[in-house]
């Protein structure tokens, strides 16, 4: 049995490397989707944007999403070191921050429907970009919820927490996408 | 790639978070100050943002470093 241990460990490492590469390729393909919708903003509207955009709300939800990335990072670190309590606490915090972000987007949508409805040029871009991104946040929240409950059942242990790592990487990607979407919609002039 | 101890990792995460918030606020203030032509500055700051998240939070270096 002991003779097989190094081979088993090597297999685990290579499986992990393949998982990571696969996830990064998936995220790259998602990156192309966001790059396409971001470029459509410049193609259709140039650098114009309405003055009525709620800038403070935009900055606020950006900071909330960045905070969720910090708690997600902490959850991953805790899981990787076998800290069950830290994992649960930080995953829950990430879910709350993510839900807060969606509440912020819904408030922005309510205002946007009056100021630049979806049939206007900027409205089309605004609702498409924030809608696709919010859908990614929603799927990320679902994945975090699954990971949270699996983790509470003790499914992730020190050195065997790929489920957490993969979900958290996806969550960070959603943050990266927003980092580009936020200035594209709210700030560029 | 050896993982940093939890304490070091958490402190590093906090610094990255602070840097990201500062960049977001600087972008916002830049928009208030510059009434036009802020696109190049936004692109530079967005690339820094994405780089920080990809390197520190997403551990992109795991792709080319060997596990121990």
Image: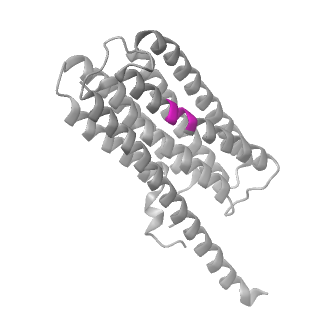
Residue at 51% across / 65% down in the picture?
A: A21
Decide if residue B5 is on the left or right side of residue A41.
Answer: right
Query: Is A65 inside the magenta-drawn segment?
Result: no
Point out residue A55 in the picture as x, y percentages from the top left corner: 38, 17
The residue positioned farthest toward the left in the image shown: B37
Up/down of A45 relative to A135, above or below = above
Up/down of B1 relative to B15, above or below = below
- Stretch in magenta: A131-135
Residue at 66% across / 85% down in the picture?
A: A7
Residue at 46% across / 46% down in the picture?
A: B12
Decide if residue B10 is on the left or right side of residue B45.
Answer: right
Point out residue A95 in the picture as x, y percentages from the top left corner: 65, 34
The residue positioned farthest toward the bottom in the image shown: A3
The C terminus of chain B: image quadrant: bottom right
Residue B19: in sight, yes or no? no
Decide if residue A83 is on the left or right side of residue A128.
Answer: right
Name the dominant secondary structure of the magenta segment: helix
């Amino acid at each position: 049995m002991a003779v097989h241990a190094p081979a088993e460990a090597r297999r685990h490492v290579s499986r992990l490397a393949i998982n990571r590469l696969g996830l990064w390729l998936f995220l790259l393909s998602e990156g192309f989707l966001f790059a396409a919708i971001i470029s459509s903003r410049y193609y259709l509207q140039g650098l114009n944007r309405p003055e009525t955009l709620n800038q403070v709300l935009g900055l606020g939800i950006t900071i909330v999403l960045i905070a969720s990335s910090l708690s997600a990072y902490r959850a991953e670190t805790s899981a990787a070191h076998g800290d069950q309590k830290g994992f649960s606490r930080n995953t829950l915090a990430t879910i709350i921050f993510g839900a807060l972000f969606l509440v912020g987007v819904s408030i922005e949508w309510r205002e946007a429907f009056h100021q630049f409805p979806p049939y206007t040029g900027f409205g089309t871009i605004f609702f498409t970009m924030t809608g696709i991104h919010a859908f990614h946040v929603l799927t990320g929240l679902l994945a975090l919820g699954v990971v949270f409950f699996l983790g509470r059942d003790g499914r992730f242990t020190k050195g065997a927490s790929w489920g957490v790592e993969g979900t958290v990487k996806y969550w960070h990607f959603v943050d990266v996408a927003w980092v580009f979407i936020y200035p594209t919609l709210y700030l560029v002039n | 790639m050896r993982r940093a101890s939890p304490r070091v990792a958490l402190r590093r995460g906090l610094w990255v978070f602070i840097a990201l918030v500062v960049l977001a606020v600087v972008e916002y203030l830049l928009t208030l100050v510059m009434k036009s032509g802020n696109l190049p500055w936004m692109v530079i700051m967005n690339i820094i943002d994405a780089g920080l998240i990809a390197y520190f939070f997403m551990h992109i270096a795991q792709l080319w470093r060997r596990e121990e």
